[in-house]
Amino acid sequence: MSLNKSTAIKTIAIISALAFIVPTTSATAAPKFKLCVALGGIPGILGALGTTGDPIAKAGAKKRGWDYYEVSNKLDAPTAVKNADLIVQQKCSALIQFNGRPEVNPTIAKKLAKAKIPVITYDIAQPGWYFLGIDNLAAGKAGGAALGKLIKDKWNCQPDLVLESHGYGAGIVDAMRTGGMVEGLKSVCPDIDKSKFKPFEGNGEIAVSQPAARDILAANPAAKKIAVVGLNDAGVVGALLAARQLGSGYEAMGWGQDGNLIAGDKVDPDLKGSVLYFLEGYSAYAFEVLDAIAKKSAPKMRDGAVNPAVLVKPCPVSAAQAQGIPIDKVRITQLAKDPSKTLFSIYCPK
Amino acid sequence: MTHLSSSRFKVPSLRKSADSEYLATILILLVVWIFLVVISVINRSDFLSRATLSAVTFNMCIIGILAIGQGFVVISGGILDLSITVSMLITSFMIVVFYDLGWNTPLLIIVSLLCAGVFGLFNSILVVWLRINPLIVTLATGFAGGGLLLIVFDRGLVDPKSSIADFGTSYLFGLPTAWWPMALLTIGAHFFFKYSRVGRHFLAVGGNPLSSKAMGISLKRTRVATFVGSSIFGGIAGIVFAGFTPEIRPNAGEYYTLPVIAAVVLAGFSLAGGRGSFLALFISVGFLSTIPTALVFFGLQSIWQTFIQGFILIIAVSIDAYRIVKVRGR
Amino acid sequence: MSTNLTRLASHDRKMSSVEKMKKSLSGPGGTIVLGLAIIIGTSALWVGKMTFSSFNIYLILGYLAIPLIIGIFASFSLLAGVVDLSIGAMVALSATIFALLSINGINEWVSAVITILICMGFGAINGTAIVVFGANPIAVTLGMLVGLRGLARILSRTAPSTSTSQDAISLFITGLNDFTESQISFIPVLFIIALVLVFVTQGIISLTRGGRHIRAVGGDITAARRAGLATERIKFLSLLASSFGASIGGILYVGKLGSAPVTLGTGMEFTIYAALMIGGYSILRGGVGNPMGGFLGLLIIAVFANLVDNKGLDIRAADIFVGLLLLVIVYLDIRRGGDAFE
């Protein structure tokens, strides 16, 4: 054993010595503005942006000659907290954060405030962080009202069931979106009986919402006219498919949120519409605030969902209207070419 | 050393006791399943309906096919294939890719299955050449494969107008079309492992690799066949998955890994290999697929599902182990 | 006869220094230390001086402290020949129960004790199924994993709705947070505690009679039984130990995170057991492995993750590397005489 230890110690010593001789590449003298992005989104909410990176932010930073650093917490709370320390170590000038585990935001805020790093937060409010996001409640209500109109026209405001495909892990965002859709629906069809509303955990994913909806439909065999609202397109489409799978006599109509499955040419026929958030292009809006911070004239703190720093406009679309719009991967490549525009301005039908 | 042809190798008494063990497991599972159905009917008389049958059989499809692949690995002494959901997703994603390229359906299905088989071949090479334990191999390749899927495929969109999507919603003889491959493959596996010579080779290798080797069965070839086989079954499940799910995400496999292992273990398969009945597997898949639907009829939220399934597994495995101990006398 | 003599003769021959170096590096301790040296060296060359900065060391050690504590307790069950796959889920359950009790006004110390007892109760269920009924440990602890995740979810929903989501209980306990975040210079106190635990456990395993008994039970249970050891009790206690470690980990996380997310500990089993395997433990047989090795294994993984973080590498690529790393480690272990599969 002593042989092992001395060899090892020698090896480590040599390598450590190397480290001091080799010139360092990180932490240069000239302080360039460094934009950092900390992601870890609930896949159902922010699609690809949540988990795999933010090409728009990267392109924008490159255009401005800024340094760029990106990290993800893979939806793990201890990693999210560790990433806050990383951000401090990386000496970021500003941080964009989309944290799918918002319950640790207060702990993260403490660390970042100590290092005086300004934060822009997407969709999840935190006191002291610039809030950038969609008014989820308004978007939900708009979608619900649109579906309500269809229910009024087709079924005379008398659906047999209203399935609410929730993603309870999304917390307040789920309450606003799905809850908002229910409110919007009721604003057009106020007389639908309470017992017809069936909330369930769909987790914002087809793999979960589909079997769950199947079981609910089986437990309500008399219901044939099914309306579906939900946290996002995937949660809604899963339930629509469940109705189609159970076969005989079902008429299903759903309206989604986030527009993930309404664009392109493989749209589910029962998804009558959705609300495009253009989530992948959120960062185009962030540069309003970031540019101001870089010029040392940080804007006034607006950290509430009610009074946001940047309000992203949602784009409600019916399936027919969405027909020309390409899927998110195509949209992102378009936007990266010219990040001065926003996806809303490029793609939302007038 | 004389080379014994395996077809002449018969130990009738051992076969009989294995059969009676399987019979006991099958009966116990049937009783528990019927019990669940009975209390559900008592709770709500409309539990027995065409809609319930459809819901349960749909639940069985993907897990049932994956369970055959997993059972194959377990019974052949491969311990567990923790990467089987990666095979499933490879096939699903490749189906999307080839469909978008305009290939015709039968061709793209076969090639997509072959892609899954290549992954299984890779697993088997690590087991056979590097001689690393399959549990660790599939743990590592499952993990790495998941990361690779995430990089290569962000998500895959299946065309609702395609024949694959139709397959996912259509019926045959009153049951979902996708259910029949699962049922037929399970019954096929039962007969294969019980009566065919090749099938009994796998059982022998799983039960006692050393004496199988002495009998002239090639362990290497068995291992390769095992892991390629399980990945093909994963691929078949991937076809069904593509039929059911219009948007395929790389992380979707995580919902199936544990329930599949639970089904295999519940069916009395021994993780040491050499023991397991595919008829029992069919029943255990059926039982586990009935629980979520029954819970809804009882008015319980779906979050109770995992809790109940987990503890049913513990109880079932304990009872089964206790029974074996009593029968074999330790 | 002649073969024995030649073998003896080669042992007596003096080994050249190259041979000595090779021998030391191919021993179990040697592989781990070599691996650690390689990964530290890579980070030093690629990331630069920052690797050795006090903040970076704090980052690495702070992140691995709690998993190390959990892992050391779990190593007892590995040593005894049972693998407890439910530790990650138990961490989440412990955090949830602790937060739930505390948020409802129960004194934190009392909550902690109740939480630990409840988790050890579930550990006892594991133990009963495995030891009394003789069920396969993988199957039982897998079922416990699934069951506890579900239970954590169910309990989390009963929390008062001041939390931001139904899948996490927000609770900031200042005293506990101060403790988990406290440092001596730049080294987290939690890490120091974990390191002390490693040394104590190493001492127990190698020096005490109890340690020898556990290794005997894990190594060859029939021989241990024949030698008169209380094999059932030892296995049962080892499972209680791993559940104890998981419950402590959960409570500490509530302090560190200021919340109890239901997804806590997802995949932690993989990291911890990979680290322990790197350190010489085996999840397929007991009796092998030492805590020092487990600690170094976790350090290797942590330094690797730190490298990925500092260079801003794609996380998904990191996943692939961890899988490959595990294969390489196990393969090297086989080359130096470990368990090959056939």
Image (cartoon, grey):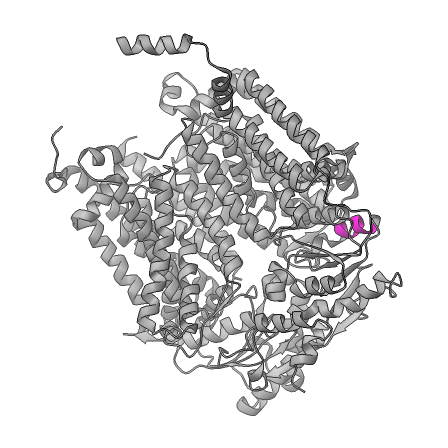
Residue at 60% across / 75% down in the picture? A259
Determine if residue A56 is in view: yes
Task: Give the vertical position of A310 relative to A37 (above or below).
Answer: below
Residue at 49% across / 49% down in the picture? B144
Q: Is residue B196 magenta?
A: no
Q: Is residue A344 left or right of residue B247?
A: right
Residue C276: x and y, percent?
A: 53, 33
Q: Main secondary structure of the magenta part?
A: helix
Q: Is residue C171 left or right of residue B161?
A: right
Most foreground residue, A295 or C267: A295
Task: Give the vertical position of A6 relative to A167 (above or below).
Answer: above
Task: Give the vertical position of B28 relative to A173 (above or below).
Answer: above
Dividing the picture into quarters, in which one does residue B324 lie?
top left
Residue at 50% across / 78% down in the picture? A267
Q: How many marks?
A: 0
Residue B305: x and y, percent?
A: 49, 57
Q: Quadrant of the C terminus of chain B?
A: top left
Q: Is residue B132 left or right of residue A27?
A: left
Dividing the picture into quarters, in which one does residue A201 lie?
bottom right
Residue C199: x and y, percent?
A: 62, 23
Residue A54: x and y, percent?
A: 65, 62
- Residues in magenta? A107-113
Most foreground residue, C227 or A313: A313
Dividing the picture into quarters, in which one does residue C128 lie?
top left
